[in-house]
């Protein structure tokens, strides 16, 4: 088990190196610069900026600097936002994305597992059909449409909830974005739970459990869910990583100061250190969560050992 | 799956009924868009646009920062809330010398920074020197290049000092300034030197008498230095210096063996005559200079704070401001909160307790917040054309002719568009009235936006005439055996239209494409690009044919539009440049009589229209929303609001039920 974990942690390093190098290369290839815009700068002004940020140094010097920064987990200063370091921005934006992502995640788990289990236990009844229809809708309505729809109904017609902006946590402002963000995941989790449960509930050990006279709730809670949720676990690890590292569309629609919003703007601004910092952060998070999922398997499923 | 369909249908019906409920509510006949309950506190909730790059007013050059800077910093002059023209702020009054090449500002004695320190002329000297310093790397530094030796300092130039005679080399001894800006062998008629570079005879001669008959401003050694003949400046970078000197052998010989002295901050033409008198000497006459004073580049900053904290000085913990509002909180990508600054000299006339600026860019989100009553106003261009039909009739819809133009540039250095006949034909074949009607705006008839500068005798470019366009193209060689225009001869591959894919640029381009197709029978290809890629291609003059662009005024004067073509590089983007044009501009700016100056500027504009390096398209229009209870905010041509005059009115009888357009000519109509 320990050897497995160490091996996986060591693999993260070359993967991260590749991700950073690729990102750096792509940013370099992209035309334009963080200061280029509709108004062209006077040559003197442009030269001053290039000198200030060392943009005229040879590429290997700049690349080496990027890697060295990466090694120290200090991504330098943002090019666009004068006097702000990338780390500062990450630490400021992460809590917003994380709170939103976690809320959506918990909501997705709660609603998704409940409806999925109900649908499986009442297979081919109206409960099953209704929940699977809703799941289908959740998968097929993109969140850039669902968000404005929810806003139209709950913020602009009923005036129950604010249409956008971040009011901190906890506050009513998180409700609509969390629902919008979780819809897709609720749908996936519900479908995964349903199929997982259907398969498990037909298996021999459930029959054994029933045969030894356990009550139906004990069968479902102690034996059914443990096996039936395995696909959900493998899905929910990366899902959590994606949810908390920022979600561009929802953060834009609801004007939330999270990582996704910074990321998309960093790309438009060609803010190289910020792009690399955020990409590195997202990559690390996803790799770590995948690792956690693999470890979690060992605890949930007695059949798996490392 | 078929068995599920009743449920799908039911769900869809539910969703649709919810949507239609929402639409029904908004379609009701309302005179205002959404809620009109004034906010509980005396605090305005506004949007500033995308996240400000920095809160250092000398660095950025865009409107999203400018909206905040107007609250946090004050300059010598402030934007008039209705016209955008300069009105006294930290300077109580100013004097202009006879040829507009030198300005004297009289500061009020009550100016205070947010920490209580008095604001003196020395603070302005510091602010302007800092803005022009190469280390600051300001994006708006070119606004200050009108000041004597400012461009030289900003670009790291060097004076040439002769150690033997202990004098500097002077421009007048060498036929050309800065080693070769007069291109193409055109013998430039030397303009008379500006008063600011002639020896001081008597201050009384230089300045027209003022009605109050103030005591004359002291003459100082620095002032005399400014008034001595201009020194030669050579580039600081050795490679560029050699290039420049190669173009002027006489100068090259003279520079050899001399000492090069870097131009320093203290050399630029900004002087604190005493604590409350500031004198600015310019390179050449620039009557429009005063219009730049409200720009944030010239808004005053606090020296000690900047020197103590470096880049971190704008951190809310350290920041010291000079405006009517001081910083309360800055939550990046979320909001900036400012509160009335009791230290400000005019604090008793500031009516708002504070302003919250939300950093929003998504227009639907902005309008949602506005409708739900969580925003009190939006900024310009926030009502999309598609919404106009339902929004423009509402009483909280604000609109004004904007000091901004939309046009296509020609690449005059490459392909068929080198030929002026082709450029003229493509311009004449475009029915701008149709485009303007479709976009609900006015067609642009010249280089400067018509009807924005009162009294300006705007020349008019060629009118829509497809037949003449065809004749011109036939003359240019695109003709069949009979000598008539033949669309098949016109190679569409050589002339395309590139545009950045922001906003509605692509549909507009497609509309024009159809107009050309209809009038000439040729299909101009559109090549949309991501913004940064687009700007890079334009800067290098790499594009074939045409490129889309627009220009927004930096100050209220036609010169801000005409100046674009005064250099072949920079924001010009067309490659067209004519020394005679530059001469005309200079002549206009030397002219004291306002109307006469406008006439000469109009002649210059006519020159651009004749050469047709651009296709004028439409004049901008501002289009934004403001709740009826917000008073003191007007649809002005700049859509920058001086926050000190804005307030929240709680008595519905005194609300705004529609505000007239503040653009001068439209108001007079």
Image (tube, coloured by chain):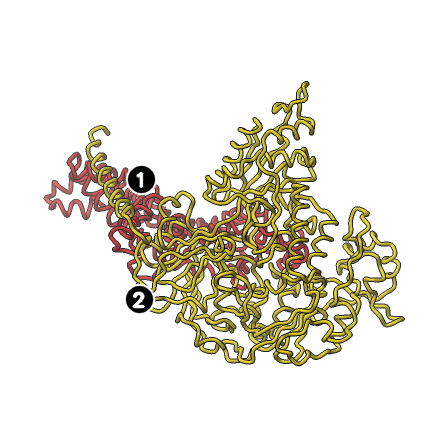
Q: Residue at x 20, y 29 (%)?
A: B3
Residue A82 x, y percent position in the rendering:
54, 62
Q: Secondary structure at mark 1?
A: helix
Q: Residue at x 45, y 59 (%)?
A: B48
Q: Secondary structure at mark 2?
A: loop
Classify A192 as above or below B623: above
Residue B212 x, y percent position in the rendering:
61, 78
Mark 2 chain: B
Nearer the observer: mark 1 or 2; the answer is: 2
Classify B422 as above or below A56: above
Residue B225 x, y percent position in the rendering:
76, 73
Q: Residues within 10 Å of mark 2 (few under 14, many from 20)?
A: few
Q: Quadrant of residue B132?
A: bottom right
Mark 1 chain: A
Q: Residue at x 62, y 73 (%)?
A: B105
In the shown orientation, is residue B436 left or right of residue A228? Answer: right
**Chain corresponding to yellow in the figure:** B
Q: Is residue A297 visible?
A: yes
Q: Nearer the viewer, residue A122 or B276?
A: B276
Q: Colour of chain A?
A: red
Residue assigned mark 2: B651
Give the numbered dot on residue A139.
Answer: 1
């Amino acid at each position: 088990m320990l050897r497995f974990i160490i091996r996986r942690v060591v693999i993260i390093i070359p993967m991260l190196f590749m991700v950073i190098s690729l990102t750096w290369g792509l940013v370099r290839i992209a035309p334009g610069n963080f200061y280029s815009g509709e108004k062209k700068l006077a040559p003197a002004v442009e030269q001053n900026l290039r000198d200030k940020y060392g943009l005229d140094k040879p590429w290997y010097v700049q690349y080496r600097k990027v890697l060295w920064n990466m090694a120290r987990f200090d991504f330098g200063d943002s090019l666009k936002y004068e006097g702000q370091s990338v780390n500062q921005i990450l630490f400021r934006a992460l809590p917003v994305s994380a709170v939103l992502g976690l809320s959506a995640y918990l909501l997705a788990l709660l609603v998704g597992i409940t409806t999925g289990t109900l649908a499986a236990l009442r297979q081919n009844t109206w409960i099953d059909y209704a929940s699977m229809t809703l799941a289908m809708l959740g998968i097929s309505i993109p969140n850039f449409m669902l968000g404005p729809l929810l806003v139209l109904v709950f913020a602009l017609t009923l005036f129950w909830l604010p249409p956008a902006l971040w009011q901190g946590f906890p506050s009513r402002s998180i409700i609509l974005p969390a629902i919008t963000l979780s819809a897709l995941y609720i749908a996936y989790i519900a479908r995964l739970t349903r199929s997982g449960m259907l398969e498990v509930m037909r298996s021999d050990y459930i029959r054994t459990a029933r045969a030894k006279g356990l009550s139906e709730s004990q069968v479902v809670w102690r034996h059914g869910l443990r096996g039936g949720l395995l696909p959900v676990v493998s899905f929910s690890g990366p899902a959590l990583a994606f949810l908390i590292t920022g979600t561009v569309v929802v953060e834009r629609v609801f004007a939330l100061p999270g990582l996704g919003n910074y990321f998309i703007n960093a790309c438009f601004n060609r803010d190289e250190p910020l792009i690399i910092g955020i990409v590195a952060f997202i990559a690390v998070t996803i790799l770590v969560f995948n690792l956690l999922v693999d470890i979690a398997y060992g605890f949930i499923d007695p059949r798996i050992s490392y | 799956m078929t068995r599920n369909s009743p449920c799908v249908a039911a769900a869809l019906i539910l969703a649709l009924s919810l949507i239609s409920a929402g639409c029904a509510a908004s379609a009701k006949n309302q005179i205002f868009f959404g809620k009109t309950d004034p906010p509980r506190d005396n605090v305005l909730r506004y949007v500033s646009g995308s996240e400000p790059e920095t809160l250092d007013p000398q660095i950025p050059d865009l409107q999203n920062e400018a909206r905040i800077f107007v609250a946090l910093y004050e300059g010598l002059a402030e934007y008039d809330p209705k016209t955008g023209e300069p009105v006294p702020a930290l300077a109580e009054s100013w004097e202009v010398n006879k040829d507009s090449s030198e300005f004297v500002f009289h500061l009020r004695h009550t100016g205070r920074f947010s920490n209580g320190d008095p604001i003196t002329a020395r603070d302005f000297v510091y602010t302007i020197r800092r803005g022009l310093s190469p280390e600051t790397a300001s994006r708006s530094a070119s606004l200050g290049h009108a000041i004597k030796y400012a461009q030289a300092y900003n670009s790291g130039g060097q004076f040439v000092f002769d150690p033997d005679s202990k004098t500097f080399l002077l421009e007048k001894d060498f036929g050309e300034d800065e080693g070769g800006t007069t291109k193409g062998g055109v013998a430039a008629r030397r303009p008379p030197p500006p008063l600011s570079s002639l020896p001081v005879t008597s201050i009384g001669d230089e300045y027209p008498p003022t009605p109050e008959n103030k005591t004359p401003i002291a003459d100082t050694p620095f002032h005399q230095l400014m008034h001595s003949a201009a020194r030669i400046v050579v580039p600081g970078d050795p490679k560029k210096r050699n290039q420049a000197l190669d173009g002027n052998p006489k100068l090259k010989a003279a520079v050899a063996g001399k000492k090069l002295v870097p131009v320093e901050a203290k050399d630029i033409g900004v002087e604190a005559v005493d604590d409350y008198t500031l004198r600015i000497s310019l390179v050449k006459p620039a009557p429009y200079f005063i219009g730049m004073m409200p720009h944030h580049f010239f808004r005053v900053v606090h020296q000690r704070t900047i020197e103590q904290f470096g880049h971190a000085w704008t951190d809310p913990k350290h920041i010291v401001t000079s405006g009517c509002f001081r910083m309360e909180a800055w939550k990046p990508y979320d909001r900036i909160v400012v509160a009335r600054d009791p230290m400000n000299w005019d604090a008793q006339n500031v009516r708002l307790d504070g302003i919250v600026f939300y950093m929003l860019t998504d227009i639907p989100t902005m309008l949602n917040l506005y409708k739900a009553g969580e925003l009190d106003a939006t900024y310009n261009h926030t009502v999309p054309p598609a919404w106009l039909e339902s929004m423009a009739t509402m009483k909280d819809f604000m609109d004004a002719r904007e000091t901004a133009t939309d046009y296509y540039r020609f690449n005059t250095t490459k392909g068929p568009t080198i030929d002026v006949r082709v450029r003229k034909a493509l311009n004449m074949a475009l029915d701008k009235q149709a485009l303007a009607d479709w976009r609900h705006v006015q067609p642009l008839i010249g280089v400067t936006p018509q009807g924005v500068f009162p009294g300006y005798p705007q020349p008019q470019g060629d009118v829509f005439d497809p037949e003449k366009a065809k004749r011109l193209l036939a003359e240019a060689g695109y003709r069949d055996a009979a000598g008539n225009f033949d669309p098949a001869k016109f190679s569409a591959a050589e002339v395309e239209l590139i545009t950045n894919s922001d906003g509605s640029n692509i549909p507009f381009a497609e509309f024009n494409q159809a107009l050309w197709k209809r009038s000439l029978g040729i299909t101009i290809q559109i090549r949309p690009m991501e913004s940064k890629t687009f700007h890079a291609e334009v800067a290098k003059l790499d594009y074939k044919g045409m490129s889309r662009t627009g220009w927004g005024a930096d100050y209220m004067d036609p010169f801000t539009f005409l100046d674009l073509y005064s250099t072949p590089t920079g924001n010009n983007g067309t490659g067209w440049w004519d020394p005679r044009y530059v001469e005309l501009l200079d002549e206009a700016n030397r002219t004291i009589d306002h109307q006469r100056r406008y006439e000469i500027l109009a002649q210059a504009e006519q020159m651009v229209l004749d050469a047709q390096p651009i296709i004028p398209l439409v004049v901008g229009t501002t289009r934004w929303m403001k709740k009826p209870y917000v008073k003191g905010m007007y649809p002005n041509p700049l859509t920058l609001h001086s926050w000190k005059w804005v307030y929240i009115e709680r008595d519905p009888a005194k609300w705004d039920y529609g505000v007239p357009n503040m653009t001068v000519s439209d108001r007079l109509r």
